[in-house]
Structures are given as C-alpha cells and as structure tokens.
Image: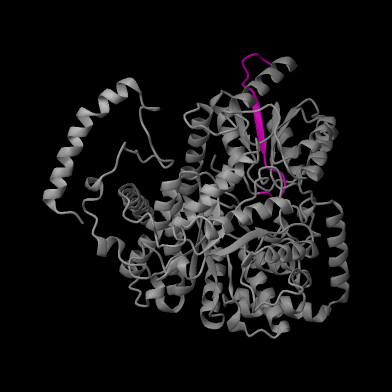
C-alpha cells in the first residue's frame, strides 16, 4: 500500500433500521477529514456488506445500528469478513448499543463501539491512529 | 394593533435606551455571545417591543380560539374544557407484552393508545422473513397477521379507546385488522376512533421505511383517505408528519414547510380521486416534534395552524370550518435525548412538552429519560406520563387559552416561522411539487446539511449540550434497569406464526391474494379487498409481496 493512498471507509447500515442521521454525519465528517467514503444506504444484509467491503477494497468499516439487531447481525458480518479473508479491515460500530453488549462485540473483532454524543473528531482520530498502526 | 403616535414614541424611547443604558452595561458585563439565534437560525434581538409586530392585525392574524386563522387554538375553551390526549408511543416484543404495557399505561392515566410496530412489520415483512432475522419485536411489537393484532387488543374495547398507529406502507393492512377486531367486538365501524400515520411521502426523505416507489406509495395513502372519508368517519386516515423530518436533522422551519408541502400533495392527490375538499379535509391530521428551542417551538405550532388554515381556505377553497383545522399530535424530540446523564432528559422533556401545550397541541407523547439507551422501562415511561400530568394539573398553564399570545417575541417568531415556511413551499411548488422535489433529492440534501451543521455547532461548542459537551461526569447514573427484548421473543413469534399458517383456511388465503392482485392491477381502491384478506388471516408479508409484484420496490436515492 502506498503512503499516499487515502483511507477508504465503508459506512454501512445493516438490517431494517432506518435511522441514518448518525451514519450520514459520520460519513461527511470522515470525508471532510480527507478520507474516501462509500456509504451503503439502508437495509443492507450482512452478505451485501461483506461483498461491498471486498469490491470496494476498503480499509475501514463503520457499522451503524439503532434497532437492537446488532446482537444478531454484527456476528454474521464479522464471520463473513473472516471467511472472505478480510479480517484485517478495521471495524467500528455506533448507534444504540448497550454497554453490556460491548465486550462480546469486541471479542468478535469489532475494535470500538461509539455511543450517542461521540464527537466526530474522536472518530477521525480513532480511524487515523488505528490505520497508522496497521500500515 | 398600535397607533402610529405611540409607536413613534416607543421607537424613540427604545433608541434612547439602546444608547444610554445598554453600551455602558455591556462594557461592564459583556453579553455571552456576539450573536444570538434560534435553532433555525433566526437571529434573536436583545428585546422585542411593539415595533417588531407593528403590522400585526389582531383580527386578521390572531383572532379568537376556534375561529379563523386559529392561531390561538382550535377550540373555544381549549384546555379549560378538555385536556390534550396523553398518548404514549409504545410497543416491544410480543403482542402479549405490548398488550400488558398498554394496560399498564391506561391504568396510570394515559388517555389514548399509540402502537410502535417492529421493523419487519413496518417494512412489510413477516416475522419469519430472512430480512426480519434479529429484528423481531426489537424496536416495536411484531404483528404479522390478525392473530397478533387480536392478542394486542385483548381486553381493550375499541369503542372506549382511540388508537394511533405508526404505520405507513402497510397502513391499509393494519387499519384493516383494526376494523376486523371491531367487527368481532361488535363495535360499529363509524365509532372507530384513531389515526393511521399513512404519510408515505415523508418516508422518502425522513423516516425512510419505504416499500414501494413514490407513485404507488401516494396511491396507497390516498386509498385510505378516500376509504375513510366514505366509511370510517371518525378515523384520521393520515397523520402528516414533521416529526421524522425533524429527527432526521431538519430545523423547525424546514419541518414546518416540508410537512405542509406534503399536506398540499395529499389534498391534491385526493381531489384527483373526485372527492370534494370538505369531504376529507376535516380528518387530515398532523404530527410535529417539540425540540429544545422553547419559544421557537411554540411559534412553530401557532404558525402551523395559521398557515394550514390559509392554505386550505385560499388555495383549496375549503368551506367547512373543520377543513381549516390543523389538529396535531406532538412528540418531544427523541434526538435531543442524551445517553450521558440520562436523568437530565426528564428536564428536557418537561420543557419540550410545556412548549407543545403552550403551542396548543391536541395530543402529546413525552419521551422517557432512558430512550437514548434502550426502549423505555416501566418506571421511565411513568415519569414521562407524569410530566404531562404535572403540566396539566399543577402548572396552571392550562387555565387560560394561548397564554403567550400577544408576547412581542412569540408573535414576531410566529410571523417569521410562517413567512420562512411559505418561502420554502413556494420553492417546492416551483420544483413541481413534493414528488419532483423528492426525485431531485432536495429534501434529503436540505435535511442532511442541517443535521451536519447542528452537529458541528455542538462540537465547536457554539451550542452547549449539558452533560455532552459541558458539565460532563465520569460515570453516568441510570436509575432503572434498561429494558431488553429477550431473543426468545423471536422464537416464540415464529412458533405462533407457524401455527397460524397451519390452522388457517388455505383456499381462502389463495382466493384473497388472487383478488388483491387483480384489484391492484386495475388500480382500484384496495382497502375493501385488504379487509377481506386480513380476515382470512393473510399476513402482512403476503399482502405486501403481492403489492410489490404489482407496484415494484423502491430503491433508495442516496444523498449524503
């Protein structure tokens, strides 16, 4: 990977949840910070998200969910990424995700879970630092 | 409202005060900001005087409650007579669980029901559809067929309650189920009281739970308006919703303007069916958010009533005074709730609901303090309901009508809200109406821009959010156990659905679906056929699949 390549980020909305205000704000903020953003739009299945990750060759995935379906959908997404050999992609999540679920999500490879009220500057730093470590 | 000589005197005195008193005070005590503005960006002056409302004509612009232009309220005695309906949006897990929550809320003094359906139900999938995995009962109650709806209303007589349903694409199906239950309970259909949200237009840019493309979506909304006008005279077939527009990120002016623009589109679409405006307009209802900016929200509600009355009178030539009424439900704004120090949300909700009451709402939902974390627990819901009861019975604000009417600031803001909203409506008209504005991505872009701007202002600390960007604490205190929907709910629901499919009359199901297909092909009003279908226990997924095959499916226009 060349040093000049922009960080490529997929912002994804798994499941039927239609709350996309946060996902769009995160997408814009990361774009304004110089990253390349691919936004999936709503109602993505785990298979679609894994496929887009592969096709778009992204470095980072941001999963946004507010419906409570994260306990079912996130493990599926992480399993598919692993099967497709993409477990080196940095994955973070945001939305309405109870604290008590976070340890289990980290265990399956989600690097961080951000709750409501997180400043976008925190996300930008998180992505930049973690990608720097990996490159 | 003021005589010219008095105004000149006030103006002179104001200038004197501004040069003699203000600068020296500011020198010693600088103001907190260089510029003050409302959340919609209307700049706010230090002081409002009669000069700011000098063109206000009492009879023309305010009038009397229950009379045109309804600025001061819809009813002659407002809350001195009947309070607003206390209606808490609720639903989770199975139909039994939500039935219990309904009964709990009624026991605690709620005066109307409001159903939250889960994602599969609102997007037209049965609980056993692959897209429903993990979502069943999570964000609302799972309803796949009349069987579930029967459980949901077990022991609740439909002639004793009014029920609101947040349902759009499948609105006809859920209303059909409600009708089926009323038939079983022996309640005459003309007595059915309640509301189906059925506002499919805002789905394309706000709530985003679209199923079908815009044209058939508008057709389905219109079907219900037409059917109710003819057969369910006490039912509100539509709740034209600004709430989701606001939650998606718009400001108050945009919320007001886009909602009324949608309203215009529904009136036009129903007129095209050959109904006269006074045959259906009295039953159009509205739904707004109440956000943090107290006075701006009050001004928004007052302006909304006045503007809608003008539109109905001048644009659509409505004659029946009730056609000019904007009856509204208000929900305190979910997006203002903070996950940090959640108890603070009780205070936010109290101010927001007070604004709704001072704005003259007919119905109110108050959010629970734990809703930035989860669906509300029983204790939190009770506090939310108690907030309404305290405003109603303790604060005294309900004892006189429109107590802020005549406030220089509130009247000024009411005028501003109306003018700014009207400018947007003119722009939307110039684009060819709501449908073309949706196709152009106009609303989507406007809303996303506002949402981003709001977020940036918080991050730059131009706006203080208590507990989020200031006055933070290390550890939050949550005084209740958060509600979790048990994963077993999905399993139970699937079992029930399997059993129902086995027990129902398969021939009747097939017959109903074939008929639906034929009627949809012929572009008929689908409501009667859908009532027959749900009575045969045809599921929401099965009905929606037929309609998908005829109407096609919507593909999201992505605007970031």
Residue B268 vertical position relative to residue A131 in the rendered view, above or below: below
User: Is residue B168 within the magenta segment?
Assistant: no
Q: Main secondary structure of the magenta part?
A: loop
Give the residue furthest to the top. Answer: A3
B258 or B36, which lies in front?
Answer: B36
The one nearer the camera, B414 or B207, is: B414
Q: Relative to B275, does residue B209 appear above or below in the rendering? A: above
Residue located 50% across and 64% down the image: B362
Q: Position of residue B152 (x, y in %)?
A: 75, 68
Q: Quadrant of the C terminus of chain B?
A: top right
Q: Is residue B296 above or below residue B535?
A: above
The image position of residue B551, as x and y in percent, is 61, 65
The answer to whether residue B463 is above or below residue B226 is: above
Start-end of magenta stretch: A1-17
Q: As rendered, which of B235 and B129 lies closer to the eye?
A: B235
Q: Which percent across, then down, holds residue B329?
A: 52, 61
Residue B42 on image: x %, y %: 36, 41
């Amino acid at each position: 990977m060349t040093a000049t390549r922009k960080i490529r980020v997929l912002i994804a909305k798994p499941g039927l949840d239609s709350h996309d205000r946060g996902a769009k704000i995160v997408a814009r903020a990361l774009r304004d910070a110089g990253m390349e953003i691919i936004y999936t739009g709503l109602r993505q299945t785990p298979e679609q998200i894994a496929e887009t990750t592969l096709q778009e060759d992204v470095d980072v995935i941001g999963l946004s969910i507010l419906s409570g379906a994260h306990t079912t959908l996130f493990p599926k997404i992480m399993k598919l990424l692993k099967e497709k050999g993409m477990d080196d992609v940095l994955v973070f999540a945001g939305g309405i995700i109870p604290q008590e679920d976070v340890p289990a999500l980290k265990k399956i490879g989600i690097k961080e879970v951000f709750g409501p009220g997180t400043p976008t500057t925190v996300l930008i730093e998180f992505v930049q630092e973690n990608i720097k470590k990996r490159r | 409202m003021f005589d010219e000589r008095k105004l000149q005197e006030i103006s002179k005195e104001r200038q004197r005060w501004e040069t003699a008193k203000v600068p020296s005070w500011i020198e010693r005590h600088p103001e907190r900001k260089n510029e003050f503005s409302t959340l919609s960006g209307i700049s706010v002056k230090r002081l409002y005087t009669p000069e700011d409302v000098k063109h206000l004509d009492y009879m023309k612009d305010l009038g009397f409650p229950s009379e045109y232009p309804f600025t001061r309220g819809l009813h002659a005695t407002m809350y001195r007579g009947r309070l607003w309906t206390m209606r808490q949006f609720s639903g989770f897990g199975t139909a039994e669980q939500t039935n219990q929550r309904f009964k709990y809320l009624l026991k605690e003094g709620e005066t109307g029901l409001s159903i939250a359906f889960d994602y599969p139900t609102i997007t037209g999938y049965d609980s056993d559809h692959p897209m429903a995995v993990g979502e069943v009962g999570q964000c609302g109650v799972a309803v796949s067929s009349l069987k579930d709806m029967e459980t949901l209303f077990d022991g609740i007589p439909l002639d004793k309650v009014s029920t609101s349903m947040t349902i759009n694409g499948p609105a006809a199906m859920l209303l059909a189920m409600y009708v089926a239950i009323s038939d079983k309970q022996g309640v005459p259909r003309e007595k059915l009281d309640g509301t189906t949200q059925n506002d499919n237009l805002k789905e394309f840019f706000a709530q985003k739970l679209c199923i079908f493309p815009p044209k058939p979506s508008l057709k389905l909304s219109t079907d219900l308006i037409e059917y109710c006008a003819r057969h369910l005279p006490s039912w509100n077939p539509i709740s034209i919703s600004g709430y989701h527009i606001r939650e998606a990120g718009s400001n108050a002016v945009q919320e007001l303007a886009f909602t009324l623009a949608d309203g215009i589109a529904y009136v036009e679409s129903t007129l095209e069916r050959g109904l006269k405006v006074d045959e259906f307009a009295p039953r159009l209802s509205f739904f707004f958010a109440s956000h943090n900016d107290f006075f701006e929200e009050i001004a928004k509600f007052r302006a909304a009533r006045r503007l809608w009355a003008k539109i109905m009178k001048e644009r659509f030539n409505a004659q029946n005074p009730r056609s000019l009424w904007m009856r509204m439900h208000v929900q305190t704004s979910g997006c203002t709730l903070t996950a940090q120090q959640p108890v603070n949300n009780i205070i936010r909700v109290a101010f927001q609901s007070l604004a709704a009451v001072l704005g003259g709402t007919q119905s109110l939902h108050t959010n629970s303090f734990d809703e930035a974390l989860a669906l509300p627990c029983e204790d939190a819901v009770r506090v939310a309901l108690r907030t309404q009861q305290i405003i109603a019975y303790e604060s005294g604000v309900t004892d006189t009508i429109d107590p802020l009417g005549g406030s220089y600031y509130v009247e000024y803001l009411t005028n501003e809200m109306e003018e700014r909203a009207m400018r947007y409506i003119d722009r939307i008209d110039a684009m060819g109406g709501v449908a073309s504005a949706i196709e152009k991505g106009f609303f989507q872009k406007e809303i996303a821009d506002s949402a981003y701007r709001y977020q940036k202002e918080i991050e730059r600390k131009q706006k203080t959010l208590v507990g989020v960007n200031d006055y933070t604490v290390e550890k939050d205190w949550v005084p209740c156990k958060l509600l979790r929907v048990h994963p077993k709910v999905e399993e139970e629901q699937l079992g029930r659905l399997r059993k129902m499919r086995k027990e129902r009359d398969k021939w009747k199901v097939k017959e109903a679906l074939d008929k639906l297909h034929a009627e949809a092909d012929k572009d008929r009003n689908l409501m009667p056929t859908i009532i027959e279908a749900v009575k045969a226990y045809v599921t929401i997924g099965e009905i929606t699949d037929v309609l998908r095959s005829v109407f096609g499916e919507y593909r999201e226009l992505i605007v970031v």
